Amino acid sequence: MTAMLSIDDVHTYYGDSYVLQGVTLELKPGQVVALLGRNGVGKTTLVRSIAGLTPAQRGRIVFRDTDITRMPAYRIARMGIGLVPQGRRVFKSLSVKEHLQVTARGDGQWNFDRVVGLFPNLQSRLRSLAGKLSGGEQQMLAAARALVGNPEILLMDEPTEGLAPLMVRELGKTIESLKAAGTSILLVEQQLAFALRYADIVFIMSKGRIVHSCTPAELAKDSETKARYLGV
Ligand SMILES: Nc1ncnc2c1ncn2[C@@H]1O[C@H](COP(=O)(O)OP(=O)(O)OP(=O)(O)O)[C@@H](O)[C@H]1O
Ligand SMILES: [Mg+2]
């Protein structure tokens, strides 16, 4: 199977601050890859490098057959890489419906009706301003906004952060639907149980590098790795 996304020896800086120190990782078609690691190890920076928001200085990021390493973010998004950013980043003064209208792209399977159908909580709040939604509803909106762009790859950066258990379950169902539809997902997660339930493969990051890769079942049994890199 050829890779959907291949990240090869990527190095990324914020000014003089050297954050990603040679990250190599592969996402295959239809796979859910979990990216785990303690706070500040560089998970979001990797997501930003893929999305073109903080481009890598060295190394290569290839989407299908296209080198996207230094492509501008809007082009990467248009090519089919959707982003659910950490902290949701919805537009407070746009309604739910307006969010989905302004970000719709392409004539793929995720049209307005289908996306709204996936999120019952949003369906009843189409006219509400995003700033008036609960944290969980805003997270759903961030996911829905990425989906109407019909991405082939979805980058989800800590989608369960701050969600009540019921909303976490809803989000899990969404991930299952996306997976069934063949979307590849890079899932950055702090909730280990959630990541292990939905991931096909797990990568662990420490100090700007991938230090471990295994199946969810292997990680579940590996208390040494969990203690050393995840603090659990
Ligand atoms: N805009 C920025 N400018 C300078 N340094 C930054 C910036 N954003 C993040 N950093 C630093 O880069 C490092 C990696 O941050 P990053 O946000 O990628 O970590 P993370 O693994 O996503 O953490 P968390 O689990 O808390 O979300 C940290 O040391 C952080 O302080
Ligand atoms: Mg982060």
Image (tube, rainbow, N blue to C red):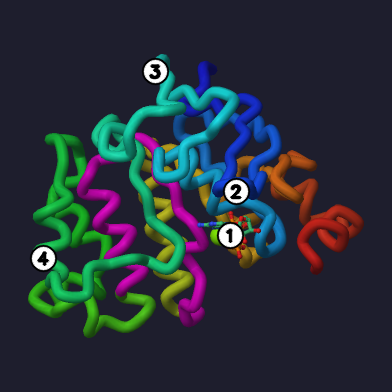
Q: Which amino acid type is marked by label 4?
A: Lys
Dot 4, how many residues are within 10 Å of its Cα: few (below 14), some (14-19), or many (20+)? many
For the point 63% across and 51% down, which residue is it? 42
Earlier in the chain: of badge 1 and badge 4, it is 4
As helix, strand or loop, the secondary structure at mark 4 comes to helix
List x then y, in percent, for residue 178.
Answer: 37, 47
Earlier in the chain: of badge 4 and badge 3, it is 3
Q: Which mark is residue 34?
A: 2
Q: Which residue is mark 3?
A: 66
Q: Which residue is mark 1?
A: 189
Dot 1, how many residues are within 10 Å of its Cα: few (below 14), some (14-19), or many (20+)? many
Quarter occupied by the N terminus = top right
Mark nearer the viewer, 4 or 3: 3
Label 2 close to label 1 by CB (< 8 Å): yes
Task: Look at the picture and state if 122 lies above or below 14.
Answer: below
Residue 228 part of the magenta-drawn span: no
**Marks 1/3: CA distance?**
27 Å
| Of residues 42 and 64, the one drawn nearer to the viewer in this rendering | 42
Q: Please tell me in which quadrant of the rendered image residue 132 appears.
A: bottom left
Q: Which residue is mark 4?
A: 97
Magenta part of the protein: which range?
A: 138-165
- Viewed as shown, does residue 47 lie left or right of 23? left
Mark nearer the viewer, 2 or 3: 3
As helix, strand or loop, the secondary structure at mark 1 comes to loop
Q: Ligand 1 is located in which of the four quadrants?
A: bottom right
